[in-house]
Amino acid sequence: MSGTLRVGVLASGTGTNLQAILDRVHGRGGVEVVAVGSDQPSAQALERAALAGVETAVFPREEHADRAERDLAVARWLQGRGVELVVLAGYMQLLAPAFLSRFAGQVINVHPALLPAFPGIRAIEQALDYGVKVFGVTVHFVDEGVDSGAIILQRALDLPEATEAEAVRSALRPVEHDLLCEAVRLIARDAVRIDPANPRRVLIAS
Ligand code: GRF
């Protein structure tokens, strides 16, 4: 990739991961966040984007015929802004194949577990119910499955005494912010490749 990487972020909630990207990556190192979209009109992420002067849009499911149509509208909006990388930062929707085919290999997600353990919603609660002592964060490419795309970055966190989901969430949040920002930086400097010998494996150039 040459020049500036134009990034679009999709978020459904509070948007602390979006804020980390805006604070640490946006406008430096060849990264520009140019669009923030949400399925939720009340998402705090939209306010954060607006404060940073980034264009926003809302795509509520009920305003479109079905999920595929909604996702197509999101894809067209992002493509209209020249987005080259889509970051899911707490976006609580699966993306339709029609979206993913338009952004093949260009969508990443942050997940609060060490995938492939505990995909899907309530990942931290799943891990606590299982009784794990090591938690963690994964940043991965998005495919048509649930948190099943190739893994870009992972980091573990020892929390052997953890019993409360909120405490684990708080402990993982800074790790999420670090890893997601790092993944965007790496992609911006074209340091992320799929291993030709194993498409599940992501190679990171040093
Ligand atoms: C994060 O825990 C992320 O891993 C999950 O959704 C949460 C979003 O948090 N996918 P925030 O909205 O970025 O604060």
Image (cartoon, rainbow, N blue to C red):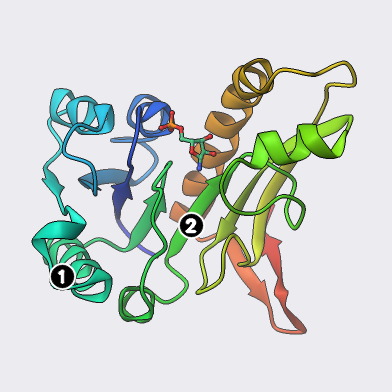
Image x and y of residue 63, in percent: 9, 60
Q: Is residue 28 above or below residue 114?
A: above
Residue that label 1 marks: 76
Q: Is residue 33 above or below residue 198?
A: above
Mark pair 2, 1: CA separation: 18 Å
In the picture, which quadrant includes the N terminus? bottom left
Give the SS element for disc 1.
helix
Image x and y of residue 39, in percent: 24, 49
Image x and y of residue 133, in percent: 89, 29
Residue at image coords 32%, 41%: 12
Circle 1 crowding by C-alpha within 10 Å: few under 14, some 14–19, many from 20? some
Residue that label 2 marks: 108
Residue at image coords 15%, 70%: 76
Q: Is residue 3 above or below residue 199?
A: above
- Asked if residue 17 lies left or right of residue 98, the reply is right
Give the SS element for disc 2.
strand
Circle 2 crowding by C-alpha within 10 Å: few under 14, some 14–19, many from 20? many
Residue 156 shows in this picture: no
Viewer-closest of 122 and 12:
122
Viewer-closest of 94 and 29:
94
Q: Which mark is residue 132?
A: none
What kind of residue is marked 2?
A: Ile
Image x and y of residue 125, in percent: 68, 34
Which mark sits nearer the N-terminus, 2 or 1? Answer: 1
| Image quarter of residue 70 | bottom left
Q: Are marks 2 and 1 in contact (CB under 8 Å)?
A: no
- Asked if residue 115 lies left or right of residue 32, the reply is right
Q: Is residue 132 above or below residue 189?
A: above
What kind of residue is marked 1?
A: Arg
Residue at image coords 34%, 33%: 13
| Image quarter of residue 160 | top right
